Image (spheres, rainbow, N blue to C red):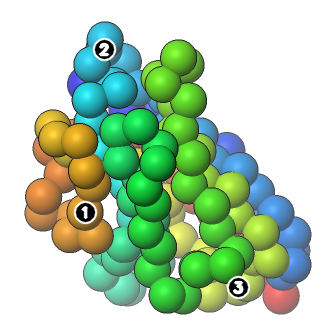
Amino acid sequence: VQLQASGGGLVQAGDSLRLSCAASGRTFSNYGMGWFRQAPGKEREFVATINYSGSTTAYADVVKGRFTISRDNAKNTVYLQMNSLKPEDTAIYYCAAVRRFYGSSRATEYDYWGQGTLVTVSS
């Protein structure tokens, strides 16, 4: 599976962005998916995860209520809708896939990673 993240950019605090992660391969619908981020000088951290069908999601507390993860298996794509962005959301955002139905908040459990897309939120 190859993952291609896109949609990052420079926005102001309070704005919204939608990130996309396009996956290759015919088995996308069997994979749990996740979004992670890494800010400068910090470790990679969990943002959100979604199961194979989209029926189950989970979020980091710091984004809960502001971010929404979703997926379209017909398009082999997972999304991260980010609303009410804050300067502390500035980071490179990575999508990841795991070869099982349910994702995880642990980066080490993921099998495939995209290249990342930069989100910069100005105050």
Q: Is residue 116 rendered to the left or right of residue 13? A: left
Q: Which residue is pictured at 36% across the width and 72% down the height? A: 46
Helix, strand or loop status at disc 1: loop
Q: Position of residue 37 (x, y in %)?
A: 43, 68
Give the residue type that dot 1 points to. Answer: Ser
Q: Is residue 31 above or below residue 69?
A: above
Which class describes the residues within 10 Å of circle 2: few (<14), some (14-19), or many (20+)? Answer: few
- List the residue tagged with mark 3: 87
Any part of residue 31 in sight: yes
Q: Position of residue 13 (x, y in %)?
A: 84, 81
Mark identifier at residue 104: 1
Q: Is residue 88 rendered to the left or right of residue 50? A: right
Q: Which of marks 1 and 3 precedes in the sequence?
A: 3
- Label 3 or label 1, whichever lies nearer to me, is 1
Q: Which residue is pictured at 43% across the width and 68% down the height? A: 58
Q: Which residue is pictured at 87% across the width and 69% down the height? A: 15
Which class describes the residues within 10 Å of circle 3: few (<14), some (14-19), or many (20+)? Answer: some
Residue placed most toward the observer, 119 or 62:
62
Q: Which of marks 3 and 2 precedes in the sequence?
A: 2
CA distance separating discs 1 and 2:
21 Å
- List the residue tagged with mark 2: 25
Q: Is residue 102 rendered to the left or right of residue 42? A: left
Helix, strand or loop status at disc 3: helix
CA distance separating discs 2 and 3:
35 Å
CA distance separating discs 3 and 1:
26 Å
Give the residue type that dot 2 points to. Answer: Gly
- Label 2 or label 3, whichever lies nearer to me, is 2
Any part of residue 94 in sight: no
Q: Which of marks 2 and 1 precedes in the sequence?
A: 2
Give the residue type that dot 3 points to. Answer: Pro
Q: Position of residue 10 (x, y in %)?
A: 77, 62
